[in-house]
Amino acid sequence: MSIFKRLRDLTLSNVFALIEKAEDPIKMTDQYIRDMSADLEDAEKAVASQIAIEKRFKQSYEEQEALVKKREEQAHMAAQAQNIDLARRALEEKKNAEAKRDEFKANYEQNKASADNLRAKLNEMRKQLTEMKNKRDTLIARYQAAKAQKEINHAMSEFSSDSATSGLKRMEEKMLQMEAQAQASEEVNGQNKSLDDEFASLGKDKAVEDELAALMKQYENKS
């Protein structure tokens, strides 16, 4: 028994709700479409068979109705000819034909009602199958969007704001440590200058001071 046959009493909206809750709604939708298509083929065969029965009873009913009229006309013809025996036989066959006609008519009307009911159900099944096919693209789009959102949320949870802040703080601490080491290295290098280096530096400073004093002396006489 197919899935759709098991859930035939459900409305299509409930079917869509079940599909959306499924682990893989695309596969579920395609399975429903296949099942509904198979059910539709079975229903079409059943309706065709019922219509054939309806037509047979209708044909039999119409044949007996025609025979009733024919025997009635023949009875009148025999009566006009004063043929009592022939008129009686015509009326007897008319009566038998009326009984058969009424029986065929009842069967025809009953089977026509059944066929009409099956036609209505068949049209509803066709409508639901069309709606299911039209809904497939929407379901697929929603599923893919939800899947992408889920992946993004997972990625964001892995890359949380706390971890980013913690990583940045570690980088800042490392930079401060490197700067401190550089400054300490510079101080150490300064402390490790030789005596000759210090005197050379002192000489450079004295030369600048002497040149500055000479420059200032030039402008003292002009002021």
Image (cartoon, rainbow, N blue to C red):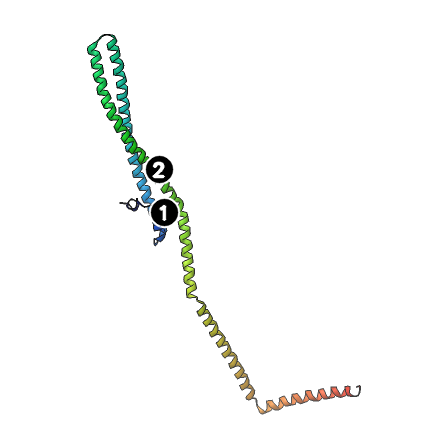
Q: Examine the rendered structure and indicate whether residue 75 appears above or below residue 125.
A: above
Residue 13, disc: 1
Q: Position of residue 72 (x, y in %)?
A: 26, 15
Q: Residue at x 38, y 43 (%)?
A: 131
Q: Secondary structure at mark 2?
A: helix
Q: Residue furthest left?
A: 85
Q: Nearer the viewer, residue 46 or 54?
A: 54
Residue pictured at 41% horizontal, 53% vertical: 144
Q: Is residue 155 above or below residue 38?
A: below
Q: How many marks?
A: 2
Residue 19 location (% of width, % of height): 35, 50
**Residue 190 location, quadrant:** bottom right
Other residues around mark 1 within 10 Å, as few (<14) / some (14–19) / many (≥20): few
Left or right side of 127 for 81: left
Residue with the mark numbered 2 = 123
Q: Mark 1–mark 2 contact, CB under 8 Å?
A: no
**Which mark is first along the chain, 2 or 1?**
1
Residue drawn where x is 23% and y is 20% of the image? 97
Give how far apart the Cα atoms at labels 1 and 2 are.
18 Å
The reply to whether residue 48 is in sight is: no
For label 2, the crowd category at 10 Å Cα-Cα, with few meaning under 14, some 14 to 19 and many 20 or more, is few
Inspect the image, locate mark 2, and give the three-letter code of the amino acid beneath it: Asn
Between 175 and 108, the one lying in front of the other is 108
Tell me the amino acid under the disc marked 1.
Answer: Ser
Quadrant that contains the C terminus = bottom right
